[in-house]
Image (tube, coloured by chain):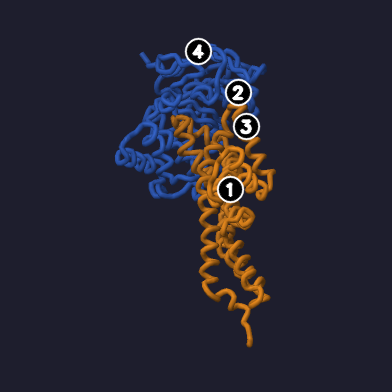
Amino acid sequence: MPEQILKIDKLNKYYGQHQVLYDISFEIQKGEVVALLGPSGSGKSTLIRCLNGLEQFQSGFLFFGGKQITPQEKNWPQLRQKIGMVFQSYDLFPNLSVLDNILLGPLKVQKRQRAEATAEALKLLQRVGLEKYAEVYPRQLSGGQKQRVAIVRALALHPELMLFDEVTASLDPEMVRGILEIIRELSERDNMTMIIVTHEMNFAAQIADRILFLEEGRILEQTPGKEFFQHAKTQRAREFLESMTF
Amino acid sequence: MVHLGTNILFAGNNFVRLLEGLWTTVWIAICALIIGLILGTGLGILRTSKNRPVRILLRLYLEFFRIVPSVVLLFLFYYILPRQLNLNLPAEQMAVLAFALWVAAEFSDIVRGALISVPQHQKESGLALGLNGWQLFRYVLLPQALVLELPATINLATRVVKTTSLLMLISVMDVINIGQQIIEANRQTYPNGIFWIYGIIFLFYFIVDYPLSLWARRLAAKQH
């Protein structure tokens, strides 16, 4: 029986009076890749940010590894070590070298030994082709390189779930492929569980086991990846897919 | 008999006395800066807190020290504190106290500005790594804020050095006060002494402040 990692049940979120997420419910099993698709402003990013406590939700339930998590959870710092997140704008710390960016979490949050953490960080850097850049500062890197470092930084904490929030949206087109390759490899080689917000439809079609299609804060449909792109259930999703292709 | 005007600088122990005065000036500025920067860092952090009364109180403190002219501050400390609060300190220490509180006020605003100008994304990506509030502050916000605030801090330091020239008003033997004494004592022998003495004082202040000013400008240029 597959192991459930995350379960969301009837999650609602408001900004003041304004409701932005309506009764969101879904589960994700270990090793599964879920892509959140939908038009801009549909709540994809807000939803993924609720999953590691960067946004609070007002009602509903969130379970991680079978344990319930309250929105005002005091243990978020601990949980976030298991729920890695990578953002659109990379957000490396400009005052730290690439290696120190990666080591901040393992050394300060997880209190691991420097030698062991460094060895692992270098191995991860090698894996994304940046082993020569350990001592370099973020401003000397291209956007694609920064994003690769950001992914390594999240992986260094040994997360059980990775959240990718439009990680290729601000990259030059020729950089996108490299990032997507890394994400694909994470799924295929490491069997990493992932939730991906993306506008790269071809990528989602290839990698996602399941698509959640959101509009105006509601999940309109949950469909297996291949099926979604061949014949989506809802009219709205078919229109959306059509608008994304030439 | 031909007088060289410059001789006033080296007659007797005049030059050594001027250097001693300069040392008093620099010493008071350094003490005020060290105390003021430490205090100001704390106040600046508190000014980003969520507690409204604390923020308002510190804002009033800042505005008071910013609006009241430095001369008035010095007189307040020198004449009023001893009488009303029975606090008797040597003039030098009064000066350090007054300047330190002024520096703390100005620096709290620099620290606050730097802290809030670290982008929200940086905070979030720190949180996403599992950093707690203190770790986020220590490893993400503070180092970036320090870089942002350095040019403004150096500018503040040059202003403090300049403003020490007011110290003669509360009888501190700073470089200006000593210069004034030398001029008056030599009025007969060197009628043009005032020109040379203030010339050398100008040079002293320039030598202390200009490197600071250059440093601030280079740092500011690097950031843009």
What's the distance in space between the residues labelled 2 and 3, CA to CA? 40 Å
User: As rendered, which of A217 and B22 lies closer to the eye?
Assistant: B22
Q: Is residue B155 above or below residue A206?
A: below
For mark 4, what is the residue? A61
Graded by Cα atoms within 10 Å as few (under 14), some (14 to 19) or many (20 or more), the crowding at tag 1 reads many
Q: Give the mark toward the camera: 1 or 3.
A: 1
**Label 3 lies in what chain?**
B
Q: Looking at numbered disc 4 in the image, what kind of residue is underneath it?
A: Phe
Tell me which amino acid carries mark 1. Phe
Q: Position of residue A198 (x, y in %)?
A: 55, 30
Q: Earlier in the sequence, mark 1 or mark 3?
A: 3
Q: Secondary structure at mark 3?
A: helix
**Chain B's shade in the image?**
orange
Q: Are marks 2 and 4 on the same chain?
A: yes
Residue B192 lies, with reference to residue B25, above or below; the image says below
Residue shown at 51% from the left, 18% from the top: A71
Please name the residue that numbered disc 1 is placed on: B99
Classify 10 Å Cα crowding around label 4: few (below 14), some (14-19), many (20 and above).
some
